Image (cartoon, rainbow, N blue to C red):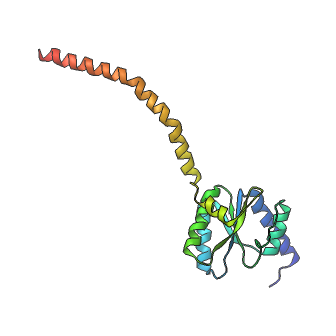
Amino acid sequence: MALSKERKEEVLAQYNDWMSRSEALILLAYKGASVQDMEEARAKVRESGGEFHVVQNRLAKLAIKANDLEVPEGYFENSTAIGFAFEDVASTAKALADTAKEVEAFEFKGGYMGAELLSPEQVVALSKLPSLPEMRAKLLGTIQAPMSQLVRTLAEPARGLAAVIKAYSEESAAA
C-alpha cells in the first residue's frame, strides 16, 4: 500500500530524528525472518539502549543523505532494517550479532558510526567489543589497583609494629 505524501514526510522526519540521536546505525537484511524473530531482535536492542526498525529503502536513503552520510551501493536494496544505537554502540551491535547467529535470515549489510561508513566485517568486530559498563569497570579497576597497593604498602609497617607490640605484651603477660 502506497503512503500518502503527509505520511511519507512523517516517516522521513522520524528517520531523521533517530539518525540524528544515534551514535551508530547498523543495517541488516532480514529477508525470510518471522515476526517473532523481528520482535525478539527489537527487544534485545531495546535492552541495549537502542531501537530496531524495518525501514523503507527510498525514505531511508533520503534520511541518510539529509544527515550528510554517503549511500553506498547495495546498502539499501531488498529488505532493510536498521539498528539505532542511542547509548552504547557495542551493546547494540552485540545484541544484533547475537540475533543474527540465531536467525539465519539476518545478515549485516554494514553501517555507520558517526559519519564513518562501516563494512559488515567492521560491524561484527564492533559487536565483539566490551560493552560500556564492562569498559567502565575495567577502567575503574585499573585506576584503583595502584592506589590499593599504595595503601597496603603504607599500612604494612604499622601492621608489623602492632604485631610486635602484641607479641611482646602477650609474652609479658605470660611471664
Where, by quadrant of the figure, is residue 122 drawn? bottom right
Picture mark count: 0
Would you say residue 11 is visible in this rendering? no
Would you say residue 97 is visible in this rendering? yes
Where, by quadrant of the figure, is residue 48 drawn? bottom right
Please give the name of the residue rendered at 56% of the width and 50% of the height, measured from the top-left corner. 133
Image position, residue 146 (x, y; %)? 49, 33
Observer-nearest of 43 and 81: 81
- Is residue 55 left or right of 160 when viewed as pictured? right
Please give the name of the residue rendered at 84% of the width and 68% of the height, measured from the top-left corner. 62
- Is residue 113 left or right of 162 when viewed as pictured? right
Image position, residue 119 (x, y; %)? 70, 64
Q: Is residue 36 above or below residue 97?
A: below
Please give the name of the residue rendered at 65% of the width and 73% of the height, measured from the top-left corner. 107
Please give the name of the residue rendered at 80% of the width and 68% of the height, measured from the top-left corner. 72
Image position, residue 45 (x, y; %)? 61, 65
- Is residue 147 left or right of 41 when viewed as pictured? left
